[in-house]
């Protein structure tokens, strides 16, 4: 059974990539990943728009968001656990939260860029396919 629940925006290309990496690292299945963008997902503990605006996780029955949610996820993954434990320090967590807030400001531009790059890559794959 998962020890940590993570809600993520499956409609965000950056989020999908990040969660794909975390799933690969979570070999023990300690994290339950829930796609908030999915219409099938009904386990939202708070407003769906709020879950889409910031990264959220449930650790030890406590809902956390932003850098604290990333730290909770990291603590559940053995490879990243030291970083997650370091984030229990208020100063470190404060710096991580400042970096997360800065990321949120540029996130829409990064999402558009990744979407454009994915579209170009997809078109190239279609153009390269041999015709029967």
Image (tube, helix red, strand yellow):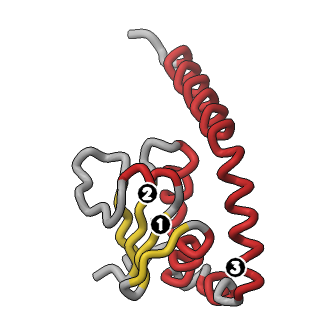
10 Å neighbourhood of mark 3: few (<14), some, or many (≥20)?
some
Measured Cα–Cα span from mark 1 to mark 3: 15 Å
Q: Which mark is residue 56?
A: 1
Asked if disc 2 and disc 1 are in contact, CB closer than 8 Å, the reply is yes
Q: Secondary structure at mark 1?
A: strand
At 71% across and 86% down in the image, what residue appears?
90
Measured Cα–Cα span from mark 3 to mark 2: 20 Å
Q: Is residue 21 above or below residue 53?
A: below
Measured Cα–Cα span from mark 2 to mark 1: 6 Å
Q: Quarter of the image holding residue 94?
A: bottom right
Q: Which mark is residue 10?
A: none
At 71% across and 44% down in the image, what residue appears?
106
10 Å neighbourhood of mark 2: few (<14), some, or many (≥20)?
many
**Circle nearer the N terminus (1, 3):** 1
Q: Secondary structure at mark 3?
A: helix
10 Å neighbourhood of mark 1: few (<14), some, or many (≥20)?
many
Q: Is residue 119 above or below residue 99?
A: above
Q: Is residue 112 above or below residue 9?
A: above
Whether residue 54 can be seen here: yes
Whether residue 28 can be seen here: no
Q: Quadrant of the N terminus?
A: bottom left
**Circle nearer the N terminus (3, 2):** 2
**Circle nearer the N terminus (2, 1):** 2
| Residue on which disc 3 sits | 93
Q: Quarter of the image holding residue 107?
A: top right
| Residue on which disc 2 sits | 51
């Amino acid at each position: 059974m998962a020890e940590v629940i993570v809600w993520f925006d499956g409609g965000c290309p950056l989020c999908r990539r990040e969660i794909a990496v975390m799933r690969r690292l979570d070999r023990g299945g300690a994290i339950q990943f829930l796609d908030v963008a999915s219409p099938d997902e009904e386990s939202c503990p708070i407003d769906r728009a709020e879950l889409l605006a910031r990264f959220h996780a449930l650790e030890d029955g406590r809902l956390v968001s932003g850098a604290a949610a990333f730290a909770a996820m990291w603590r559940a993954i053995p490879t990243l656990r030291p970083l997650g434990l370091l984030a229990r320090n208020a100063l470190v967590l404060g710096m991580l939260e400042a970096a997360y807030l800065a990321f949120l400001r540029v996130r829409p531009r990064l999402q558009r860029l990744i979407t454009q790059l994915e579209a170009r890559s997809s078109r190239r794959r279609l153009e390269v396919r041999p015709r029967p």
